Image (spheres, rainbow, N blue to C red):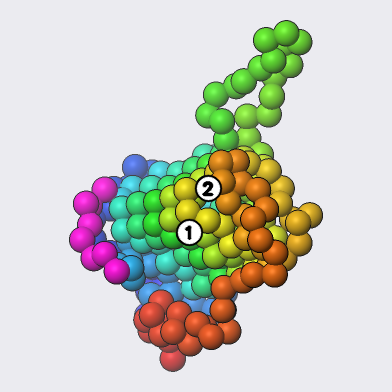
Amino acid sequence: MQLPFFIYGKARFTSIAGDFIIDAPIQRGMIGFGQPYEINKASMGISEFNVNGTLIFKGYFQLGKDFFVFTSKHAVCEFGHMSSLGCRSKIVCTSSIKFGEFARLGPECQVIDTNFHNMKNTITHEVFEKSKPIDVGSYNFISNRVTLLKGSSTPKYCTIASNSVCTRDYTALGNNILIGGAPAKLIKENIARDWSGEKEGLESLLMIFKK
């Protein structure tokens, strides 16, 4: 029997009323929750699932220690093959969040597609959209403590500097870019992580039961 989901350490299941869908060939241990694949190995044991919507896995996926995952009813969160989020990361999905293949997020990142509360213009009384989809491009290298907020969209081969806050669509800037800041803006063009050079190492580290 194949066991595609591995849960490492303690995890609280506040709700798993939603759906977990694997849209890829099933392999043992292909999806790791709380996986200690980073240089720090100790865990606080505070991982929590609150899944009322749908999680879709397009292949192998890893989520580091002490994570928090929330999806509201009817929300869809999709993880591309070989995507990952580091330890103490948070996902709050009330509408739609999508990670492309090899979208790699460092520790303490948070991806939140909602304001949580309604906001309005105090003059016109216009009520702003509370939630907007987030789309993280394939082969994104996202450093630690990065926040992606509602409406964020990144191109392929995008690098995001530590402690940045992404708030808009960056795809018009093109591929192979470095963005950073709060809010994030273009820092450098024609730059990307050496994905081809690291591919074998990544697979050996994360595809623990690869045939």
Residue at image mark 1: 143
Mark 1: few/some/many CA within 10 Å (<14, 14-19, 20+): many
Q: Which mark is residue 133?
A: none
Considering only vertical position in the picture, is 110 above or below 29?
above
Callout 2: SS: loop
Please indicate whether residue 156 sits to the left or right of residue 172 in the image: left
Q: Residue at x 21, y 51 (%)?
A: 44
The image quarter containing residue 62 is bottom left
Please indicate whether residue 132 sits to the left or right of residue 124 in the image: left
Main secondary structure of the magenta stretch: loop
Image quadrant in which the N terminus is located: bottom left
Image quadrant in which the C terminus is located: bottom left
Amino acid carrying label 2: it is Ser
The answer to which of 16 and 71 lies nearer the viewer is 71
Pointer 1 or 2: first along the chain: 1
Residues at marks 1 and 2, CA–CA distance in whole angstroms: 9 Å
Say whether residue 181 is visible: yes
Mark 1–mark 2 CB contact (< 8 Å): yes
The answer to which of 210 and 44 lies nearer the viewer is 44
Q: Residue at x 44, y 60 (%)?
A: 106
- The residue stretch that appears in magenta: 39-46
Residue at image mark 2: 164
Where is residue 6? Give x, y as percent. Answer: 34, 68
Considering only vertical position in the picture, is 57 above or below 195?
above
Considering only vertical position in the picture, is 100 above or below 180?
below
Q: Residue at x 67, y 10 (%)?
A: 122
Amino acid carrying label 1: it is Ser
Where is residue 101? Give x, y as percent. Answer: 60, 69
Q: Residue at x 43, y 50 (%)?
A: 145
Where is residue 124? Give x, y as percent. Answer: 76, 10
Where is residue 38? Give x, y as percent. Answer: 33, 68
